[in-house]
Image (spheres, rainbow, N blue to C red):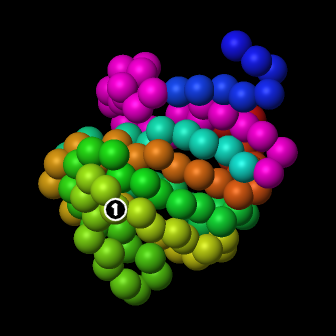
Amino acid sequence: MSGSYLAFSQAQLIEKYGSGAGYNEFLRRRGMSLGLFTLPVGAVDRQHPHMADEVYIVLEGKGTLQVVDEKVPVEAGSIVSVDHGEEHNFIDVVEDLKMLVIFAPPDLPDEDEA
């Protein structure tokens, strides 16, 4: 493996991080970070607005992303961008959601996560 790149497969990421609920960052660079975010059916998404712009790429599952007062249905193949500082939460998770999340620049960790 070269020092100038890292390669991942969706199957490996889901096998490693896809059980349970939560966010698992697997790559951090100066300008961005990537993680796998998993929400099981009925989960309560307690995230807060982030200091970075964010993109969700839904790999599996079905639910709704509420951004401020708008509800955006999401399912496998959906791609949604949320601007930094905006209130947003996943609601009505009807099939376990597994999402690739991209932060640009990398989001700072919560004080209780650091």
x, y percent for residue 68: 46, 81
Residue 11: within the magenta? yes
Q: Residue at x 65, y 54 (%)?
A: 103
Q: Which amino acid lies under the numbered mark 1 shown in the image of this protein?
A: Ser
The image shows residue 21, relative to residue 94, as above or below, that is above
In the rendered structure, the answer to whether residue 56 lies left or right of residue 95 reads right
Q: Sort mark 1 into few (<14), some (14-19) or many (20+) by Cα contacts within 10 Å.
A: some
| Residue shown at 71% from the left, 57% from the top | 104
Residue tagged 1: 78
**Region in magenta:** 9-31
Q: Quadrant of the N terminus?
A: top right
- Percent across and percent down for residue 19 are 33, 27
Q: Is residue 49 left or right of residue 67?
A: right
Q: Which quadrant is home to the C terminus?
A: top right
Q: Secondary structure at mark 1?
A: loop
Residue at the image point whose x is 79% and y is 51% from the top: 31
- Residue most toward the right? 30
In the figure, residue 91 lies in which quadrant?
bottom left
Residue 26 horizontal/vertical position (percent): 60, 31
In the image, residue 23 lies in the stretch drawn in magenta: yes
Residue most toward the left? 94
Number of marks present in the image shown: 1
Seen as rendered, the residue at the extreme top is: 1
Asked if residue 42 can be seen in this view, the reply is no
